[in-house]
Amino acid sequence: MARYTGPVCKLCRREGMKLFLKGDRCEGEKCAYTRRPYPPGQHGQARIKLSEYAVRLREKQKVRRVYGIVEKQFRRYYFEATRRKGRTGEEMLNLLESRLDNVVYRLGFSQTRAEARQVVKHNHILVNGKRLNIPSYVCKKNDKIEIREESRKIPGITLALAAFDKRAAISWVSLDKANFAGTFTGTFAREELNAVSIRENLIVEYYSR
């Protein structure tokens, strides 16, 4: 399945909530979901009762779209989580939060995960002093992530860092703003994922059917 390249605001409307896929725009009056809080399409405003299967499917699609990954990758994270100790749903979220593109986003080097993926792919990121351009790389505890010195004046990165203080604090990353660097501490805490309501138990039920 190819990566979605259409209007991302449609994804928020389809899932019935803000997924914060466009950074600051999602907070303003131009947000498409604020103006039209119903699914896109001809029958978007019709009242449709979802089946139990549809509820689980929508939850899975919502989380997949928040992290910007395709179905094959998402399924792989789920089955990897089933092999770990602990609750499968939380372990899956832990893996998703450990992705390099997500860590770059959490550290404030980008305003969205899509931008973070681009920053990684364009060779602007060093991990433990070495250049790494694989967005799906799973960060390990105490990995040091920093912006290459040649890339520190890129407007998108400086603007994102300037707005970092507006975000809610996340315990599994530690930022050194002055040096354009941060550390992935690895101490994932499920209760800190409050920006988007996630019901990971429904995703587990979807794949367990």
Image (tube, rainbow, N blue to C red):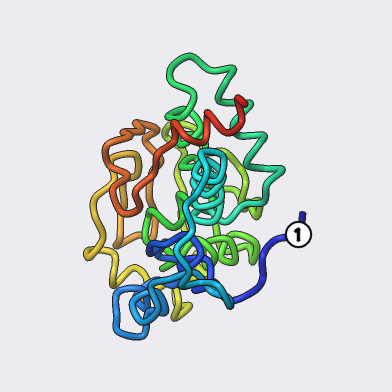
- Residue 41 x/y as whole percent: 58, 76
Q: Looking at this view, is 21 or 115 the one in front?
A: 21
Instruction: Find disc 1 in the rendering and name its residue.
Output: 2
Which secondary structure, mark 1?
loop
x 46%, y 42%: residue:
97
Q: Nearer the viewer, residue 3 or 133?
A: 3
Residue at image coords 24%, 54%: 168
Q: Residue furthest right?
A: 1
Going by the image, does 74 lie left or right of 144? Answer: right
As shown in the figure, which amino acid type bears the numbered disc 1?
Ala
- The C terminus - image quarter: top right
How many residues crowd around disc 1 within 10 Å: few (fewer than 14), some, or many (20 or more)? few
Examine the rendering and report whether any part of residue 127 can be seen: no
Q: Residue at x 36, y 33 (%)?
A: 188
Res. 30 image quadrant: bottom left
Q: Judge by depth and name the residue closer to the eye, 16 or 188.
A: 16
Query: In the rendering, at what x and y percent does residue 87 appear?
Result: 43, 20
Who's the residue at 35% across and 44% down the image?
173
Quadrant of the image containing the N terminus:
bottom right
- In the depicted structure, whether residue 203 falls above or below residue 47: above
Residue extending furthest toward the bottom = 30
Quarter of the image for residue 99 reads: top right
